Amino acid sequence: DRPLTLIAGPCQLESLDHARMIAGQMKEACAKYGAQYVFKASYDKANRTSLSGKRGLGVDEGLKVLQTIAKEFDVPVLTDVHTEAQCAVAAEAVDILQIPAFLCRQTDMLLAAGKTGKAVNIKKGQFLAPWDMANVVAKVESTGNKNILLTERGTSFGYNTLVADMRSLPQMAQGGYPVVMDATHSVQQPGGKGGSTGGQREFAPLMARAAVSLGIASVFIETHEDPDNAPSDGPNMIYLDQMPKLIESLMRFDALAKADPIRI
Amino acid sequence: DRPLTLIAGPCQLESLDHARMIAGQMKEACAKYGAQYVFKASYDKANRTSLSGKRGLGVDEGLKVLQTIAKEFDVPVLTDVHTEAQCAVAAEAVDILQIPAFLCRQTDMLLAAGKTGKAVNIKKGQFLAPWDMANVVAKVESTGNKNILLTERGTSFGYNTLVADMRSLPQMAQGGYPVVMDATHSVQQPGGKGGSTGGQREFAPLMARAAVSLGIASVFIETHEDPDNAPSDGPNMIYLDQMPKLIESLMRFDALAKADPIRI
Amino acid sequence: DRPLTLIAGPCQLESLDHARMIAGQMKEACAKYGAQYVFKASYDKANRTSLSGKRGLGVDEGLKVLQTIAKEFDVPVLTDVHTEAQCAVAAEAVDILQIPAFLCRQTDMLLAAGKTGKAVNIKKGQFLAPWDMANVVAKVESTGNKNILLTERGTSFGYNTLVADMRSLPQMAQGGYPVVMDATHSVQQPGGKGGSTGGQREFAPLMARAAVSLGIASVFIETHEDPDNAPSDGPNMIYLDQMPKLIESLMRFDALAKADPIRI
Amino acid sequence: DRPLTLIAGPCQLESLDHARMIAGQMKEACAKYGAQYVFKASYDKANRTSLSGKRGLGVDEGLKVLQTIAKEFDVPVLTDVHTEAQCAVAAEAVDILQIPAFLCRQTDMLLAAGKTGKAVNIKKGQFLAPWDMANVVAKVESTGNKNILLTERGTSFGYNTLVADMRSLPQMAQGGYPVVMDATHSVQQPGGKGGSTGGQREFAPLMARAAVSLGIASVFIETHEDPDNAPSDGPNMIYLDQMPKLIESLMRFDALAKADPIRI
């Protein structure tokens, strides 16, 4: 019933200045329209479609940038981890550890993330049913950590296509944890461009709005000032200059949804 | 940009009095909250999962009931046709002919429906991509009839399950025709109960709201005062006494969506 | 445990001479390698992707051609029906009435087909699970007709794609009726070419072989001397001159499979 | 064109004696029927559905058991790795490193596996199209290691279900590397039992036969003397005492398939 949280940022960290530019604009827009803001960026893209895909700043420099953003802008920061060992390291720099969808069943990493005591955002695997996330959640809960978020980012639907099932949001919410809609990854077309992943950027705002209308806790959006030249996820990221208007719009639907909750 | 139209009624006609009861309550609720209302019911269920499923009043008595409802309540009525020959017959009694999803590629029936000059609501086959509907539309358009509606009612997703892809709504809308979200059939579980089709009634209001938030023209909802004892589609129909509150809620989202259109 | 039956012919009837040419070559090849042969062709394509797709000779001329083929070549003939009324008419000309996949839940047509007393080959809808066919079968059985065949022709798998689930063959066989693998429609890409259906002809022999190795009763293959210029289903039909070698190969796998039955 | 290789063993290592019992029986059966044999077992199950699932002997003891099996029975051994660091360690003990399906896009692990110089068997992710494996292969090839195998183990098909697309085998083979059919994981029902994964053991022999009939290099089968009491994958493992007859049968289909190759 609290206002929507926006988790937003570039797909991967490019430089401190680039991160500042995006964090600054997003924080301002969120403040203007009453959204909570969490800065998101990856220090490493560990599962690019092809070997030639850029991977980012790396863990050392990346985490420094994230810490700087957190301090300078006084915002929580989220990043994704890729191995058990990275959990404790990243936890020193960020507020929310994110488990990538492909890795959401890797027990040791879930336990390591849980043990940091930080919030853990688990993306539902493209190969999992929403109700299967209860078993994933139990792995993190076993560490005593109940600061968990669950994210819908699309489910495999034939080859090279994902579909976002709106039922997934209330189904995952039944465990009592906040549910996040990842509006930009849900419109990916995995492998759709041969050597890289395609996407349907034009549908991302629509996915966000449909999900927000159901009263979810948070929306996750990757954004870039020039998506077509971004080092990753260009086809599905939203143009940075379109974000304020989108946030304004989503907050209207969020207010209506929170005032009129759907119970299932 | 006009207010939402609600297409609602029982899955199948049971009697004139039953139809009156539902039409009356729906018309009143729609009037109260500013929705357009179209009465929907089937005179025949021609493709029941099993032979023992009830099929309805039949074409003669059924069409009489529909005409009576249209006159008594001064509302447009919609019914589905199942053969080429039924199109002209049904067109004398109703305002909108509906092409069932399984039959949406049957050329002769589409042409016959188009030739009646009545509005034609085509349900997207569970086996079709949204963009494939352009070919279906062209069949009806070839008759000179451009009074067409397109309905999303879920797409096959593995066995015994449908998924409603929200992208389908704007994709089908690109042809310029009004798009309808069928909230109750989208949550069917075809064959899910062995000898009959299951459903997840609890998710139907959520499907309706998500779709309405995107600014569609109409929502289609089957409703019954006692779904568990209805002759068909019980598992996914919405309780009649819950409809006024749902309509009120949908109209709020509709107003917001129409004031803030998403362009793709 | 009997040798494989090959159901083969052009997708649609083009002329008597064309039908003769194909029936003659197929009968000869089947005789040479020990397969039973059934000639297949459609007199009407009632559900083409687009209106401009050719539909065939029509019912009157088409059925005459089929009767001529049956007599001249002394082979059983199969054709698909599209309405309840066509069942009795077609039954006078052919040995096997085929229910198209899209229409496999239309109760009246199933009953009409059953009542003819002819064999009824029901294609599993792309939207149905194999076990759902038990309800479909029961509709035909209710007429007293137990001369039924069940055909796998692919299941919806995302958009514009089908997948042939090999489990479907033994699952459908559990009812005791012969099971047919439709090797050429299983590799269709519905709507995959925009205004028409695409296909992956190169995979059809492979689908046939995998299915035959499981010990099925029959394989269904559409074939043409010049598929790329055929009036329908060109992208998935097999070249006529490749059929004898394919039949020879399939019969070897059939012999092995029948000698070594899989029990599930 | 060489005879089929059977990769078989228990899902997870239970003890040296248990591994000996299975390796011995499998080696004998493969020798009798002319198959190559590779012993397979996991030292750790790192992605169990739920936390309470048993994980196996662990890396130290597990690798010792695998080495003992390799020496005592003079057979190649295969095991799956779960982190970058495990690759070099496991490579000292086994002949083939296997990349789990969920992890098949993790670049660092693929590179680490490739750098060991050992053969690398990559399972196609349930979320990937067969042609997407070309990008995965290129990651391993970049290390100079071209000793690669590709395994089909089913693709997501709705919720809690996999489907094995037979087209995947020739499609993955186009890169020139040997293709393996994982007959027992293809019939898993992920999450299908709530807290654990279900399976359809009865269909595994059928999946193996259909794939072998297409002329693949290898079949992967998990087997256990008492699957229902095995610590993991019980619902889909094949009874050990049924394996000799299955191997005998598969070798017949393999001989036929290798003598009559399908070219696509």
Image (cartoon, coloured by chain):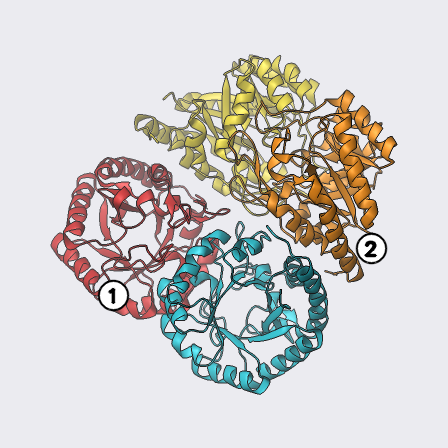
Chain colours: A red, B yellow, C orange, D cyan
Few, some or many residues within 10 Å of mark 1 (<14, 14–19, 20+)? many
Q: Residue furthest front?
A: C241
Separation of disc 1 and disc 2 at Cα?
65 Å
The answer to whether residue B68 of the structure is visible from this angle is: no
Give the image location of residue C9, x and y in percent. 73, 36
- State which chain disc 2 sits on: C
Q: Is residue A74 toward the left or the right of residue D183 in the image?
A: left
Circle 1 or circle 2, nearest the eye: 2
Identify which residue, D253 or A71, lies in the foreground. Answer: D253
Query: On the image, numbered disc 1 is attached to which residue?
Result: A91
- Asked if residue A209 is positioned above or below residue D23 in the image, the reply reads above
Query: In which image quadrant can residue D224 be found?
Result: bottom right
Give the image location of residue C170, x and y in percent. 71, 53
Q: Secondary structure at mark 1?
A: helix
Give the image location of residue B215, x and y in percent. 38, 29
Identify which residue, A257 or A83, lies in the foreground. Answer: A83
For the point 30% across and 26% down, the residue is B259
For the point 33% across and 31% down, the residue is B262
The answer to whether residue B69 of the structure is visible from this angle is: yes
Q: Which mark is drawn over residue C1?
A: 2
Q: Amino acid at mark 1?
A: Ala
For the point 35% across and 30% down, the residue is B252
- State which chain disc 1 sits on: A
For the point 38% across and 71% down, the residue is D115
